Image (tube, helix red, strand yellow):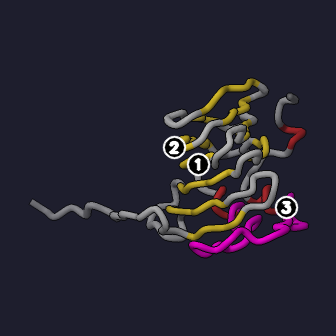
């Protein structure tokens, strides 16, 4: 019998990956665990995001991507196409193409999520909007969104607000 290549294998620890402080209103940080930059696959990207109390992941949609968010710590609200859903550990939010979605941390602790997006693209937005983060360092003050944020979002095939349904 001919030997078959089993493909790539990865085991990543909780602190592995490229991590970036995120600007407000999210606060917190995002860590890119898997992407076409470290995988032989270009089919998806995955990582984690920590949203500070009172922070939020702005509502947005994707022209070409499907996104899945798994909450593993904290509480808050998911807004999906204008409808509000409570989220807690074990909750999953799925948003297909053109679905407007966002998360709000309404709890007193950090909201922690694991995300998967396919095809990839979100990882480039996280890196472009954020500031590199080193394990154990305090969050820097005044992390500003870059002036070319609309270009960054367009290059990752985020939908423009006028392409999504109103709230």
Label 2: few (<14), some or many (≥20) within 10 Å?
Answer: some
- Check disc 3 and report the residue beneath it: 149
- Check disc 2 and report the residue beneath it: 72
Labels 3 and 1 touching (C-beta < 8 A): no
- Quadrant of image for the N terminus: bottom left
Question: Real-space Cα distance between discs 1 and 2?
Answer: 6 Å
Residue 94 colored magenta?
no
Query: Residue 38 shows which numbered tag?
Result: none
Labels 1 and 2 touching (C-beta < 8 A): yes
Q: Residue at x 76, y 71 (%)?
A: 140
Q: Which residues are magenta?
A: 125-151
Which type of secondary structure does the marked residue at label 3 adopt?
A: helix
Callout in the foreground (3, 1): 1
| Residue 45 in sight in this render | no
Label 3: few (<14), some or many (≥20) within 10 Å?
Answer: few
| Most common secondary structure along the magenta stretch | loop
Q: Going from the N terminus, do you reach mark 3 or mark 2 first?
A: 2
Q: Residue at x 49, y 70 (%)?
A: 38
Q: Going from the N terminus, do you reach mark 3 or mark 1 first?
A: 1
Residue closest to the eye, 49 or 94: 49
Callout in the foreground (3, 2): 2
Labels 3 and 2 touching (C-beta < 8 A): no
> Going by the image, does 162 lie left or right of 136?
right
Label 1: few (<14), some or many (≥20) within 10 Å?
Answer: many
> Going by the image, does 133 lie left or right of 33?
right
The residue furthest left is 1
Query: Residue 112 shows which numbered tag?
Result: 1
| Residue 134 in sight in this render | yes
Q: Residue at x 51, y 43 (%)?
A: 72
Question: Real-space Cα distance between discs 3 and 1?
Answer: 24 Å
């Amino acid at each position: 019998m001919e030997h078959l290549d089993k493909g790539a294998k990865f085991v990543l620890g909780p602190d592995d990956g490229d991590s970036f402080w995120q600007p407000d209103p999210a606060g917190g940080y995002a860590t890119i665990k898997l992407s076409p930059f470290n995988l032989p696959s270009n089919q998806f990207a995955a990582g984690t995001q920590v949203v500070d109390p009172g922070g939020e992941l702005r509502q947005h949609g994707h022209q070409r991507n499907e996104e899945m968010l798994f909450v593993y710590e904290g509480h808050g609200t998911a807004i999906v196409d204008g409808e509000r859903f409570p989220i807690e550990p074990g909750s999953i939010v799925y948003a297909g193409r053109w679905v407007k979605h966002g998360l709000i941390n309404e709890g007193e602790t950090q909201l922690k999520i694991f995300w998967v997006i396919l095809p990839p693209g979100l990882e480039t937005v996280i890196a472009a909007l954020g500031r590199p983060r080193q394990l154990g360092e305090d969050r820097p003050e005044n992390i500003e969104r870059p002036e070319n944020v609309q270009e960054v979002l367009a290059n990752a095939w985020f939908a423009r607000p006028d392409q999504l349904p109103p709230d």
